[in-house]
Image (cartoon, rainbow, N blue to C red):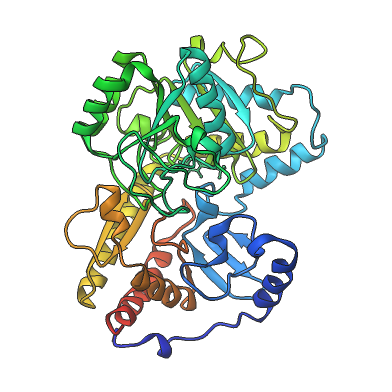
Protein backbone atom coordinates (compact mmCIF):
# COMPACT_ATOMS: atom_id res chain seq x y z
CA UNK A 1 0.00 0.00 0.00
CA UNK A 2 2.89 2.34 0.73
CA UNK A 3 4.76 0.92 -2.20
CA UNK A 4 4.95 4.06 -4.30
CA UNK A 5 7.81 6.11 -5.62
CA UNK A 6 7.89 9.87 -5.98
CA UNK A 7 7.04 9.64 -9.67
CA UNK A 8 3.77 7.80 -8.86
CA UNK A 9 2.57 10.69 -6.72
CA UNK A 10 0.38 13.40 -8.22
CA UNK A 11 2.23 16.35 -9.69
CA UNK A 12 0.69 19.67 -8.73
CA UNK A 13 0.51 22.61 -11.07
CA UNK A 14 2.94 25.39 -10.26
CA UNK A 15 2.27 27.63 -13.26
CA UNK A 16 1.10 30.71 -11.37
CA UNK A 17 3.67 30.33 -8.57
CA UNK A 18 6.45 29.92 -11.13
CA UNK A 19 5.34 33.05 -12.99
CA UNK A 20 5.27 35.10 -9.79
CA UNK A 21 8.66 33.70 -8.75
CA UNK A 22 10.16 34.82 -12.08
CA UNK A 23 8.77 38.33 -11.62
CA UNK A 24 9.88 38.40 -8.00
CA UNK A 25 13.46 37.43 -8.84
CA UNK A 26 13.76 40.53 -11.02
CA UNK A 27 12.93 42.94 -8.20
CA UNK A 28 13.83 41.06 -4.99
CA UNK A 29 17.05 39.17 -4.15
CA UNK A 30 16.29 35.49 -4.76
CA UNK A 31 12.64 36.37 -5.24
CA UNK A 32 11.82 36.23 -1.54
CA UNK A 33 11.82 38.47 1.52
CA UNK A 34 13.25 35.82 3.85
CA UNK A 35 15.77 33.30 2.49
CA UNK A 36 14.35 29.91 3.43
CA UNK A 37 11.10 30.70 1.58
CA UNK A 38 13.01 30.22 -1.68
CA UNK A 39 13.01 26.38 -1.29
CA UNK A 40 16.73 26.33 -2.07
CA UNK A 41 17.50 23.32 0.13
CA UNK A 42 14.49 21.29 -1.03
CA UNK A 43 14.30 22.35 -4.68
CA UNK A 44 11.21 23.04 -6.75
CA UNK A 45 9.06 26.10 -7.10
CA UNK A 46 8.22 27.99 -3.91
CA UNK A 47 4.45 28.18 -3.61
CA UNK A 48 3.03 31.69 -3.62
CA UNK A 49 0.17 31.75 -1.17
CA UNK A 50 -3.17 33.29 -2.08
CA UNK A 51 -5.00 32.76 1.20
CA UNK A 52 -4.99 30.87 4.48
CA UNK A 53 -7.81 29.65 6.67
CA UNK A 54 -7.70 27.45 9.78
CA UNK A 55 -5.16 24.67 9.20
CA UNK A 56 -5.01 25.28 5.43
CA UNK A 57 -2.93 27.26 2.98
CA UNK A 58 -4.14 27.82 -0.59
CA UNK A 59 -1.63 28.70 -3.29
CA UNK A 60 -2.10 30.86 -6.37
CA UNK A 61 -2.59 27.74 -8.52
CA UNK A 62 -5.63 26.87 -6.41
CA UNK A 63 -4.09 23.97 -4.47
CA UNK A 64 -4.77 23.61 -0.78
CA UNK A 65 -2.30 22.26 1.78
CA UNK A 66 -2.49 21.20 5.40
CA UNK A 67 -0.14 23.77 6.89
CA UNK A 68 2.57 22.81 9.39
CA UNK A 69 4.58 25.97 8.79
CA UNK A 70 2.17 28.19 10.71
CA UNK A 71 3.98 31.24 9.28
CA UNK A 72 7.07 29.89 11.14
CA UNK A 73 5.28 29.91 14.48
CA UNK A 74 2.81 32.75 14.99
CA UNK A 75 -0.37 30.97 13.85
CA UNK A 76 -1.04 28.88 16.94
CA UNK A 77 -4.78 29.42 16.56
CA UNK A 78 -4.70 28.58 12.87
CA UNK A 79 -5.09 31.12 10.10
CA UNK A 80 -7.60 33.93 10.12
CA UNK A 81 -9.07 32.98 13.49
CA UNK A 82 -12.43 34.78 13.80
CA UNK A 83 -11.61 36.43 17.14
CA UNK A 84 -8.27 37.75 15.88
CA UNK A 85 -9.72 38.85 12.53
CA UNK A 86 -12.50 40.69 14.35
CA UNK A 87 -10.07 42.43 16.70
CA UNK A 88 -7.97 43.64 13.77
CA UNK A 89 -11.07 44.82 11.86
CA UNK A 90 -12.29 46.68 14.92
CA UNK A 91 -8.93 48.34 15.51
CA UNK A 92 -8.80 49.34 11.87
CA UNK A 93 -11.90 51.51 12.27
CA UNK A 94 -9.83 53.70 14.64
CA UNK A 95 -6.90 54.27 12.28
CA UNK A 96 -3.65 52.39 11.76
CA UNK A 97 -0.80 54.17 13.58
CA UNK A 98 -0.52 57.14 15.92
CA UNK A 99 3.09 57.56 17.01
CA UNK A 100 1.63 58.26 20.44
CA UNK A 101 0.67 55.80 23.17
CA UNK A 102 -2.66 53.96 23.04
CA UNK A 103 -4.66 51.61 25.26
CA UNK A 104 -3.86 48.40 23.36
CA UNK A 105 -0.17 48.63 24.29
CA UNK A 106 -1.05 48.79 27.99
CA UNK A 107 -3.50 45.90 27.76
CA UNK A 108 -1.09 43.62 25.89
CA UNK A 109 1.82 44.49 28.21
CA UNK A 110 -0.34 43.71 31.25
CA UNK A 111 -1.39 40.42 29.68
CA UNK A 112 2.19 39.43 28.82
CA UNK A 113 3.45 40.30 32.33
CA UNK A 114 0.63 38.36 33.93
CA UNK A 115 1.19 35.25 31.80
CA UNK A 116 4.99 35.15 31.92
CA UNK A 117 6.15 36.65 35.20
CA UNK A 118 7.99 39.52 33.51
CA UNK A 119 7.60 42.81 35.39
CA UNK A 120 7.96 45.22 32.49
CA UNK A 121 7.74 44.86 28.72
CA UNK A 122 8.81 46.99 25.74
CA UNK A 123 7.22 46.29 22.34
CA UNK A 124 9.21 46.26 19.11
CA UNK A 125 8.37 45.01 15.61
CA UNK A 126 10.17 41.69 15.20
CA UNK A 127 12.00 38.99 17.08
CA UNK A 128 15.27 40.32 15.72
CA UNK A 129 14.63 43.73 17.26
CA UNK A 130 13.71 42.08 20.55
CA UNK A 131 16.95 40.10 20.89
CA UNK A 132 19.11 42.94 19.61
CA UNK A 133 17.55 45.31 22.15
CA UNK A 134 17.72 42.82 25.02
CA UNK A 135 21.44 42.29 24.44
CA UNK A 136 22.10 46.02 24.32
CA UNK A 137 20.16 46.35 27.53
CA UNK A 138 22.11 43.52 29.17
CA UNK A 139 25.37 45.22 28.20
CA UNK A 140 24.14 48.60 29.43
CA UNK A 141 22.90 47.17 32.70
CA UNK A 142 25.99 45.09 33.52
CA UNK A 143 28.66 47.31 31.95
CA UNK A 144 30.13 44.17 30.30
CA UNK A 145 30.65 43.66 26.57
CA UNK A 146 30.74 39.88 25.97
CA UNK A 147 27.68 37.71 25.45
CA UNK A 148 27.30 33.97 25.03
CA UNK A 149 25.08 32.04 22.66
CA UNK A 150 24.78 28.40 21.69
CA UNK A 151 25.80 26.75 18.45
CA UNK A 152 22.73 26.25 16.27
CA UNK A 153 20.50 28.63 18.25
CA UNK A 154 19.03 31.41 16.13
CA UNK A 155 18.16 34.76 17.61
CA UNK A 156 17.37 36.84 14.56
CA UNK A 157 19.82 38.59 12.28
CA UNK A 158 21.40 41.35 14.38
CA UNK A 159 25.15 41.57 13.68
CA UNK A 160 26.51 40.21 16.93
CA UNK A 161 24.06 37.28 16.84
CA UNK A 162 24.87 36.00 13.36
CA UNK A 163 27.37 33.59 14.80
CA UNK A 164 26.80 29.84 14.55
CA UNK A 165 23.17 30.69 14.12
CA UNK A 166 21.38 27.52 13.10
CA UNK A 167 19.14 26.66 10.21
CA UNK A 168 19.63 29.64 7.94
CA UNK A 169 23.43 29.71 8.14
CA UNK A 170 26.20 27.25 7.40
CA UNK A 171 28.22 26.18 10.37
CA UNK A 172 31.79 27.03 11.19
CA UNK A 173 34.10 24.81 13.18
CA UNK A 174 34.69 27.50 15.74
CA UNK A 175 36.32 26.80 19.02
CA UNK A 176 34.70 27.63 22.29
CA UNK A 177 35.02 31.35 22.72
CA UNK A 178 36.35 32.03 19.24
CA UNK A 179 33.39 32.45 17.00
CA UNK A 180 33.44 33.31 13.32
CA UNK A 181 30.80 35.53 11.71
CA UNK A 182 28.02 33.53 10.06
CA UNK A 183 27.37 36.17 7.40
CA UNK A 184 29.34 38.43 5.12
CA UNK A 185 29.09 41.99 6.35
CA UNK A 186 29.48 41.09 10.01
CA UNK A 187 32.90 42.38 11.14
CA UNK A 188 35.01 39.92 13.10
CA UNK A 189 35.21 42.55 15.81
CA UNK A 190 31.44 42.25 16.38
CA UNK A 191 31.47 38.47 16.22
CA UNK A 192 34.39 38.35 18.63
CA UNK A 193 32.16 39.79 21.34
CA UNK A 194 29.88 36.76 21.05
CA UNK A 195 31.18 33.57 22.65
CA UNK A 196 29.71 30.29 21.47
CA UNK A 197 29.13 27.07 23.41
CA UNK A 198 27.42 23.76 22.72
CA UNK A 199 23.75 23.44 23.61
CA UNK A 200 23.06 20.63 26.08
CA UNK A 201 26.73 20.38 27.06
CA UNK A 202 26.46 21.24 30.76
CA UNK A 203 30.11 20.51 31.55
CA UNK A 204 31.60 22.82 28.97
CA UNK A 205 29.12 25.52 29.91
CA UNK A 206 30.13 25.27 33.58
CA UNK A 207 33.81 25.45 32.61
CA UNK A 208 33.24 28.45 30.41
CA UNK A 209 31.26 30.22 33.14
CA UNK A 210 34.01 29.59 35.66
CA UNK A 211 36.60 31.09 33.33
CA UNK A 212 34.65 33.94 31.77
CA UNK A 213 31.33 34.28 33.59
CA UNK A 214 32.47 37.54 35.22
CA UNK A 215 33.01 39.06 31.74
CA UNK A 216 29.62 38.06 30.34
CA UNK A 217 26.75 40.53 30.14
CA UNK A 218 24.32 37.78 29.21
CA UNK A 219 23.66 34.32 27.93
CA UNK A 220 20.95 34.22 25.30
CA UNK A 221 19.37 30.85 24.54
CA UNK A 222 16.40 29.08 23.01
CA UNK A 223 14.72 27.30 25.95
CA UNK A 224 13.60 24.64 23.48
CA UNK A 225 15.60 24.87 20.26
CA UNK A 226 13.56 25.13 17.09
CA UNK A 227 16.09 26.66 14.74
CA UNK A 228 18.41 23.67 14.37
CA UNK A 229 15.39 21.45 14.22
CA UNK A 230 13.85 20.69 17.61
CA UNK A 231 16.37 20.05 20.39
CA UNK A 232 15.06 19.49 23.90
CA UNK A 233 17.19 20.81 26.78
CA UNK A 234 18.41 18.39 29.45
CA UNK A 235 17.76 19.24 33.12
CA UNK A 236 21.55 19.32 33.73
CA UNK A 237 21.99 21.88 31.00
CA UNK A 238 19.20 24.09 32.32
CA UNK A 239 20.70 23.94 35.79
CA UNK A 240 24.13 24.89 34.42
CA UNK A 241 22.49 27.83 32.64
CA UNK A 242 21.13 29.15 35.90
CA UNK A 243 24.70 29.04 37.23
CA UNK A 244 25.36 32.10 35.05
CA UNK A 245 23.36 34.24 37.42
CA UNK A 246 25.93 33.64 40.19
CA UNK A 247 28.47 35.43 38.01
CA UNK A 248 26.28 38.48 37.53
CA UNK A 249 25.57 37.34 33.98
CA UNK A 250 21.97 37.86 32.89
CA UNK A 251 19.95 34.98 31.45
CA UNK A 252 17.96 35.95 28.38
CA UNK A 253 15.35 33.39 27.38
CA UNK A 254 14.69 33.84 23.68
CA UNK A 255 11.07 32.77 23.62
CA UNK A 256 10.35 34.23 20.20
CA UNK A 257 9.34 30.75 19.03
CA UNK A 258 8.42 29.02 22.30
CA UNK A 259 6.59 31.87 24.05
CA UNK A 260 2.85 31.16 24.48
CA UNK A 261 3.46 27.91 22.53
CA UNK A 262 5.10 25.47 24.95
CA UNK A 263 2.63 26.69 27.58
CA UNK A 264 0.62 29.86 28.15
CA UNK A 265 3.65 31.07 30.13
CA UNK A 266 6.03 29.76 27.47
CA UNK A 267 8.88 27.29 27.74
CA UNK A 268 10.10 29.06 30.87
CA UNK A 269 6.88 28.01 32.58
CA UNK A 270 6.95 24.51 31.14
CA UNK A 271 10.59 23.96 32.15
CA UNK A 272 10.56 26.04 35.37
CA UNK A 273 13.22 28.50 34.21
CA UNK A 274 13.97 31.81 35.92
CA UNK A 275 15.44 34.14 33.30
CA UNK A 276 16.24 37.80 33.95
CA UNK A 277 14.94 38.87 30.55
CA UNK A 278 12.71 37.38 27.88
CA UNK A 279 12.38 38.00 24.17
CA UNK A 280 9.13 37.38 22.34
CA UNK A 281 7.87 37.53 18.78
CA UNK A 282 5.71 35.38 16.51
CA UNK A 283 2.62 34.42 18.61
CA UNK A 284 2.72 37.69 20.56
CA UNK A 285 1.63 39.51 17.39
CA UNK A 286 -1.07 37.04 16.36
CA UNK A 287 0.21 37.08 12.76
CA UNK A 288 1.08 40.78 12.62
CA UNK A 289 4.66 42.07 13.00
CA UNK A 290 5.39 42.34 16.74
CA UNK A 291 8.30 41.56 19.01
CA UNK A 292 8.86 42.38 22.66
CA UNK A 293 11.44 42.12 25.37
CA UNK A 294 10.87 42.31 29.07
CA UNK A 295 11.75 40.99 32.48
CA UNK A 296 13.00 42.35 35.81
CA UNK A 297 11.84 45.91 36.41
CA UNK A 298 15.26 47.04 37.72
CA UNK A 299 16.80 45.99 34.40
CA UNK A 300 13.99 47.27 32.16
CA UNK A 301 14.17 50.67 33.89
CA UNK A 302 17.60 51.19 32.34
CA UNK A 303 15.86 51.55 28.93
CA UNK A 304 15.20 55.06 27.59
CA UNK A 305 13.41 57.33 28.49
CA UNK A 306 14.09 56.21 32.11
CA UNK A 307 17.68 55.10 31.62
CA UNK A 308 20.73 55.42 29.38
CA UNK A 309 20.09 52.43 27.04
CA UNK A 310 18.54 53.81 23.87
CA UNK A 311 15.86 51.91 21.97
CA UNK A 312 12.96 53.26 19.92
CA UNK A 313 10.54 52.42 17.10
CA UNK A 314 8.26 54.47 14.83
CA UNK A 315 5.68 51.69 14.53
CA UNK A 316 6.31 49.98 17.89
CA UNK A 317 3.10 49.22 19.76
CA UNK A 318 1.14 49.51 16.52
CA UNK A 319 -2.59 49.42 17.36
CA UNK A 320 -3.53 46.74 14.79
CA UNK A 321 -0.67 44.52 15.92
CA UNK A 322 -1.51 45.00 19.60
CA UNK A 323 -5.14 44.07 18.90
CA UNK A 324 -4.12 40.90 17.05
CA UNK A 325 -1.68 39.88 19.79
CA UNK A 326 -4.11 40.55 22.60
CA UNK A 327 -6.94 38.65 20.89
CA UNK A 328 -4.61 35.70 20.32
CA UNK A 329 -3.42 35.54 23.93
CA UNK A 330 -6.96 35.99 25.24
CA UNK A 331 -8.27 33.23 23.00
CA UNK A 332 -5.51 30.89 24.22
CA UNK A 333 -6.32 31.74 27.82
CA UNK A 334 -10.06 31.31 27.27
CA UNK A 335 -9.72 27.87 25.65
CA UNK A 336 -9.39 25.28 28.39
CA UNK A 337 -7.31 22.29 27.38
CA UNK A 338 -5.82 23.95 24.31
CA UNK A 339 -2.24 23.21 25.36
CA UNK A 340 -3.14 19.65 26.29
CA UNK A 341 -4.62 19.21 22.81
CA UNK A 342 -1.49 20.67 21.19
CA UNK A 343 0.66 18.30 23.25
CA UNK A 344 -1.53 15.29 22.41
CA UNK A 345 -1.55 16.06 18.69
CA UNK A 346 2.20 16.65 18.76
CA UNK A 347 2.83 13.31 20.47
CA UNK A 348 0.43 11.48 18.12
CA UNK A 349 2.02 12.99 15.03
CA UNK A 350 5.53 12.17 16.29
CA UNK A 351 4.61 8.57 17.07
CA UNK A 352 2.77 8.11 13.78
CA UNK A 353 5.76 9.46 11.85
CA UNK A 354 8.17 7.14 13.69
CA UNK A 355 6.00 4.13 12.87
CA UNK A 356 5.52 5.11 9.23
CA UNK A 357 9.27 5.60 8.78
CA UNK A 358 10.05 2.28 10.39
CA UNK A 359 7.52 0.50 8.18
CA UNK A 360 9.23 1.97 5.11
CA UNK A 361 12.66 1.03 6.44
CA UNK A 362 13.73 4.67 6.66
CA UNK A 363 15.85 5.68 9.63
CA UNK A 364 14.62 8.85 11.34
CA UNK A 365 14.72 10.50 14.74
CA UNK A 366 11.60 12.50 15.57
CA UNK A 367 12.12 15.16 18.23
CA UNK A 368 8.93 16.64 19.61
CA UNK A 369 7.94 18.77 22.56
CA UNK A 370 4.38 20.06 22.67
CA UNK A 371 3.40 21.42 19.29
CA UNK A 372 6.99 21.66 17.96
CA UNK A 373 8.39 18.76 15.97
CA UNK A 374 11.28 17.84 13.64
CA UNK A 375 11.92 14.64 11.66
CA UNK A 376 15.71 14.17 11.39
CA UNK A 377 16.58 11.84 8.51
CA UNK A 378 19.34 9.24 8.38
CA UNK A 379 20.28 9.43 12.04
CA UNK A 380 20.86 6.66 14.52
CA UNK A 381 20.48 7.27 18.24
CA UNK A 382 19.45 10.56 19.84
CA UNK A 383 19.55 14.09 18.58
CA UNK A 384 20.17 16.34 21.56
CA UNK A 385 23.19 18.27 20.32
CA UNK A 386 23.69 20.56 17.38
CA UNK A 387 26.41 18.43 15.75
CA UNK A 388 24.03 15.46 15.80
CA UNK A 389 21.27 17.50 14.14
CA UNK A 390 23.70 18.86 11.55
CA UNK A 391 24.53 15.30 10.46
CA UNK A 392 20.99 14.72 9.19
CA UNK A 393 20.48 13.61 5.58
CA UNK A 394 19.20 16.68 3.76
CA UNK A 395 18.76 14.83 0.44
CA UNK A 396 16.36 12.37 2.06
CA UNK A 397 14.55 15.23 3.70
CA UNK A 398 14.19 17.06 0.37
CA UNK A 399 12.64 13.98 -1.28
CA UNK A 400 10.27 13.51 1.63
CA UNK A 401 9.34 17.20 1.67
CA UNK A 402 8.45 17.16 -2.05
CA UNK A 403 6.43 13.97 -1.66
CA UNK A 404 4.49 15.58 1.21
CA UNK A 405 3.92 18.77 -0.75
CA UNK A 406 2.48 16.97 -3.79
CA UNK A 407 0.10 15.18 -1.42
CA UNK A 408 -1.14 18.46 0.01
CA UNK A 409 0.96 18.71 3.17
CA UNK A 410 3.05 21.85 3.60
CA UNK A 411 6.02 21.02 5.86
CA UNK A 412 8.75 23.55 6.76
CA UNK A 413 11.06 23.61 3.71
CA UNK A 414 14.28 22.78 5.59
CA UNK A 415 15.62 19.81 7.52
CA UNK A 416 16.72 22.14 10.31
CA UNK A 417 13.42 23.70 11.28
CA UNK A 418 10.56 22.89 13.60
CA UNK A 419 7.06 22.42 12.28
CA UNK A 420 4.11 23.71 14.27
CA UNK A 421 0.75 22.24 15.14
CA UNK A 422 -2.06 24.71 15.68
CA UNK A 423 -5.32 24.57 17.57
CA UNK A 424 -7.04 24.47 14.16
CA UNK A 425 -5.53 21.12 13.16
CA UNK A 426 -8.02 18.25 13.35
CA UNK A 427 -7.81 14.52 13.81
CA UNK A 428 -8.62 14.19 10.10
CA UNK A 429 -5.69 16.50 9.27
CA UNK A 430 -3.35 14.24 11.26
CA UNK A 431 -4.69 11.11 9.58
CA UNK A 432 -4.26 12.62 6.12
CA UNK A 433 -0.75 13.74 7.09
CA UNK A 434 0.29 10.31 8.33
CA UNK A 435 -1.09 8.59 5.23
CA UNK A 436 0.87 11.03 3.08
CA UNK A 437 3.95 10.51 5.24
CA UNK A 438 3.80 6.74 4.73
CA UNK A 439 3.95 7.23 0.95
CA UNK A 440 6.64 9.91 1.31
CA UNK A 441 8.82 7.61 3.45
CA UNK A 442 8.33 4.89 0.84
CA UNK A 443 9.65 7.31 -1.78
CA UNK A 444 12.68 7.98 0.44
CA UNK A 445 13.19 4.25 0.85
CA UNK A 446 13.56 3.91 -2.91
CA UNK A 447 16.23 6.56 -3.25
C1 LIG B 1 12.11 33.63 14.58
C2 LIG B 1 13.06 33.79 15.69
C3 LIG B 1 13.76 35.00 15.90
C4 LIG B 1 13.69 36.15 14.92
O1 LIG B 1 12.43 36.70 14.84
P1 LIG B 1 12.07 37.59 13.54
O2 LIG B 1 10.70 38.10 13.84
O3 LIG B 1 12.14 36.66 12.38
O4 LIG B 1 13.08 38.67 13.46
C5 LIG B 1 14.54 35.11 17.02
N1 LIG B 1 14.66 34.11 17.89
C6 LIG B 1 14.03 32.93 17.72
C7 LIG B 1 14.18 31.86 18.74
C8 LIG B 1 13.23 32.73 16.60
O5 LIG B 1 12.63 31.54 16.42
Residue 428 in the image, given as x and y percentages of width and height: 41, 67
Rendered view: 194 above or below 173: above
Front-most of residues 102 and 327 = 102
Kindly identify the residue that appears in the image at 62 percent across and 37 percent down. 290
- Up the image or down, 369 lies above or below 115; here it is below
Which residue is the extreme one toward the bottom?
Answer: 8
Of 79 and 268, the residue lying toward us: 268
**Does residue 334 appear in the picture of this structure?**
no
Residue at the far left: name it: 381
Viewport quadrant of the C terminus? bottom left
Q: Residue at x 27, y 65 (%)?
A: 352
Quadrant housing residue 285: top right
Say whether residue 27 is left or right of residue 328.
right
Q: How many marks?
A: 0
Location of residue 39 with respect to 240 vertically, above or below? below
Q: Nearer the viewer, residue 17 or 246?
A: 246
Using residue 165 as the reference point, say whether residue 49 is left or right of it.
right
In x, y percent, where is residue 401? Answer: 42, 71
Q: Is residue 110 visible?
A: yes
Residue 118 rendering spot, x and y as whole percentages: 47, 20
Residue at the location (75% across, 39% down)? 90
Residue 435 vs residue 376, the one in the foreground: 376
Is 327 displayed left or right of 238 in the figure? right
Residue visible at 48% across and 73% down in the picture? 405
395 relative to 387 in the view: left or right: right
Residue 128 image offset from top left, x and y in percent: 56, 38
Q: Quadrant of residue 206?
A: top left
Amino acid sequence: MTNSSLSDLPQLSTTQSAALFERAKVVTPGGVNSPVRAFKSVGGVPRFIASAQGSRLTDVDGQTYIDYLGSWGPMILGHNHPRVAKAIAQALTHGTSYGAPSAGEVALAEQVCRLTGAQKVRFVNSGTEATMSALRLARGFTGRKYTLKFRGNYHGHADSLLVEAGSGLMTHAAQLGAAAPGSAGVPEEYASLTLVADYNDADSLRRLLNERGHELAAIIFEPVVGNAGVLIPTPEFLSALHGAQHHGCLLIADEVMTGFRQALGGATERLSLRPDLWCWGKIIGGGLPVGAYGGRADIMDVVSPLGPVYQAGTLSGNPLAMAAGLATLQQLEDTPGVYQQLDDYGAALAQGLREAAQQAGVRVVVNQLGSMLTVFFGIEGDVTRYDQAAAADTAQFATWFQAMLTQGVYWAPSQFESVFISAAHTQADLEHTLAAAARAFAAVGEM
